[in-house]
Amino acid sequence: MGKGITKILVETAVRRTVKNLKKSPEREARNLVDLGLQLSTGRFQKRLFMHAQTMLKNQNSAYYTLIKNTAMNVDEDNLVRFSINLGYNSCTKGAKLIRQTEAERHYNIPWVLNLAVNEEKLTADPDFYPSILRQGKALGIYTYLLFFRENPEKILSLVKNEPDCAFIIFLKGKQIKIPFLEKMQSVKNVMISIRSDSEMPDACHELHDARILYSVHYLYDERDTEYIINNDWIKSILPFQPNFALLLSSTTCSSETQQTVYQYVTDIRELQKYPVICMDIKQDSLMIDHIISEGECLAGFDFNGDLRTHKEILHDPRYNINSHSLEEILKSYS
């Protein structure tokens, strides 16, 4: 079956399912997963849908509540476009290109790229970040995590110009303002993630009312271990109805703490007790990358353009995106 036909079938099925989820989330969710398994061609897709099939056999799963709430409360085009870009463009089409490129050129390529967007660079060199996205897509990267400290309206044109990519934009609650929400109405390939703090509740209410797909994230270190694994954090965000609960380990967090937290994340997903999907950004990204290309590669660039991997931050001009192409950096680091 041709790629174009497959994509059309996927989008048609997803749109039909989203429309029907409000009435029968159990049946429609199972049907969509079954179809996804039938159309899967790669290792990652088959493993993901088989796991989803097993989980959805639990009639008491809180994920059915999540599915129904998401279908009712999120703009249909936002939900469909983000899902297809993440599930098909990134984890199917992009994953295949990543495997091919790695086999031909003998260096590791991450399936997702983290970018801390520097406002000065964004203004002074308008094509800088669009160029990184083009370079990433050429390698098979269709998912991007964007971190921005200023007015997020300024990066919407960046994501709008790449409609086949999936973007998660990490923001603080105070950055969620009416002009930004109004502009977001025409941007469908984005999920907003709000930092978990005192500003989060109001921001989540605004995003909910605007029918925008959103998550909540928490930056943790050793001091937060008990707060997380005792379910205190996840319970604290449930009233604000995020679709995802994302955990990010700090740069000083020990590997032992990271593994403890990740074990909690995998356990909480298996239990299906809470109507939110919990993920650890670093550990889950590494897991997905390993399935896609049988290696571990996590890469991103901080506000200064320095390379950040899952192991270290490299303050080395050879690995700075301001002076080298993405491919040069990945090749040199590998």
Image (tube, rainbow, N blue to C red):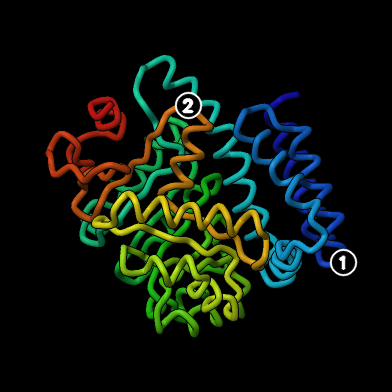
Residue 116 location, x and y as percent?
30, 55
Query: Which image quadrant for residue 77?
Result: bottom right
Identify the disc placed on residue 23.
Answer: 1
Within-10-Å neighbours for mark 1: few <14, some 14–19, many 20+: few
Mark 1 or 2: in front is 2
Q: Position of residue 223 (x, y in %)?
A: 31, 69
The residue type indicated by label 1 comes to Lys
Query: Where is residue 21 shown, x and y percent of the image?
Result: 81, 61
Viewer-closest of 35 and 93: 35
Q: Residue at x 39, y 42 (%)?
A: 133
The residue carrying mark 2 is 294
* Circle 2 crowding by C-alpha within 10 Å: few under 14, some 14–19, many from 20: few
- Which residue is at 39% across, 59% downward? 248
Classify residue 120 as left or right of residue 330.
left
**Residue at (41% x, 71% y) in the render:** 195
**In the image, what residue type sits under mark 2?**
Glu
Front residue of 138 and 334: 334
Instruction: State the residue in front, 104 or 241.
Output: 241
Look at the picture and state if 307 lies above or below 328: below
How far apart are the two marked residues, 1 and 2, measured between alpha carbons?
40 Å
Describe residue 20's horizontal placement relative to residue 70 as left or right.
right
Using the rendered image of the protein, determine whether residue 44 is visible from the camera's viewpoint: yes
Kindly state the secondary structure of the residue where label 1 is placed.
loop
Residue 60 is marked as none
Residue 88 lies in quadrant: top right
